[in-house]
Amino acid sequence: MLMSLQNSLEIAGFNVLSASDGAVAMKKLEGGAKPDLIITDINMPNMGGIEFIGKARGLPGFRFIPILALTTESQQAKRDEAKKLGATGWLLKPVGGADLSKIIRQVLPGA
Amino acid sequence: MTVAKLDEAIDSLSIDSVGAMLDTHLQLDEAIDTRLQAVMADTESSAAAIIQQMRQLYDAARNLVQILSGTSVKSEGMGADILASMSGLVEIGAFIEKLPTTMKRDLESVKQVADEITTLSELVGEIQTISLQSHMLAINAAIQASHAGSSGAAFQVVAKEMHALASNTKDVATRINKGLTRARHVVEHGIATSITDSSSRLDVVSHASKSIEKLRDSLGYMSEHYQARIATVTRHNEALARDIAEVLGQIQYQDVVRQAIERIRTAITARNDFLQGAVEAAINRDAHFGTLPAQLEMIFSDFVTEEDHHRHSALVAVEGGSEPRIELF
């Protein structure tokens, strides 16, 4: 999944910094990584996407960085929870390269 | 089998035999689980291989686009250079085309020179006449001087000098005439040769400009042709790159399948735990034995609910789903 997404984004011309789960991603953000956009899965080992969204939003300087959830999970309650914690959008897998680029450009004008 | 025989068979089942059946059941599930894990690993590794190969394909397509783009830029530059050179050639062609007229004019000038030489030859004839007349005068002067005797001696000298002058004039006029004759022959021969040699070439020269223009048009057409071909190939490669990106998106289904298998494995594990607990409750005559149906119902319900939460990830659209696939908050 990670490999597929990374390649799709790189092909679309984006520089990609990847992490295997929420905990690894948090370490990278706390270590100084400052992406323009975050795309996270929801069902992940160690730290799931919902928890990651909440923690990432709590970091200084991450209040307005778009966070998209890309998941197989369609449960409305989880969507609502993610939205409440600061997610920017909810994408159900699979999302094609063109759709993904379109959405990214919607939430990141000028990208 | 009759109902009575069935009851008899059920009564004959001991806890040990039920336990043995459960063991076999668990072994079966373990084998199924092992296979499911292998399927997950296979789909994951094949998806990774597909992604790598698609990426290589994309990189190749992108490199081709870059090469074609560079070629296009170079050919545009070459086309501009060729067109600039062609403009120069067209000017040369126009110059060459005017050459027959120029040469004709130059020949006319040379002919005028020949005419002038002829006129000069006529003047040489007049000089020779003057020389003859001077010679006659010198003879007459010499006769008159001899008639005058000693008083005419000085005049005799003048008569001799006149005679010498007339002779010299005649010699010079003869040499000039010969020179003019040779010059006239050279000029007339040159004119004749020039006309003979150039008459056939002038026809070719007169088409030089048209040939160059045709060449320019052909080069222009060829340049446009290749530009169009390059643009077409570039367009197809860009479409190929877009398709590759879409294929990479579709490979996300491997993750969908993996998660579905994980949910199935979770449900199987819960059911097996339940069965194990049920047997133990039966052996121990557990007071909560009566809640077992509800527990199993809950395992079933959890599985169905969880699957319902993922029904949008099905490859074929599922009815009843109202949640959007993409939602921006």
Image (spheres, coloured by chain):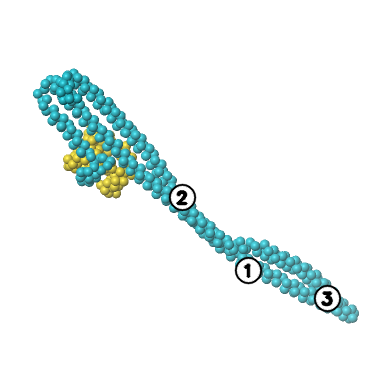
Chain colours: A yellow, B cyan
Q: Residue at x 20, y 38 (%)?
A: B308
How many residues crowd around disc 2 within 10 Å: few (fewer than 14), some, or many (20 or more)? few
Q: Nearer the viewer, mark 3 or mark 1?
A: 1
N-terminal-most mark, 2 or 3: 2
**Which residue position is annotated with label 1?**
B105
For the residues labelled 3 and 1, the Cα–Cα distance comes to 45 Å
Locate residue B283: give its quadrant.
top left
Check whether the beta carbons of the residues at disc 2 and disc 1 lie within 8 A of each other: no
For the residues labelled 2 and 3, the Cα–Cα distance comes to 87 Å
Q: Position of residue A37 (x, y in %)?
A: 26, 43
Q: Position of residue A108 (x, y in %)?
A: 27, 47
Disc 3 residue type? His
Q: Nearer the viewer, residue A75 or A66?
A: A75
Does B19 sit above or below residue B45? above
N-terminal-most mark, 3 or 1: 1
Q: Residue at x 27, y 28 (%)?
A: B32
Q: Nearer the viewer, mark 2 or mark 3?
A: 2
**Which residue position is annotated with label 3?**
B135
- Number of numbered discs on residues: 3
- Whether discs 3 and 1 lie on one chain: the answer is yes
N-terminal-most mark, 2 or 1: 2
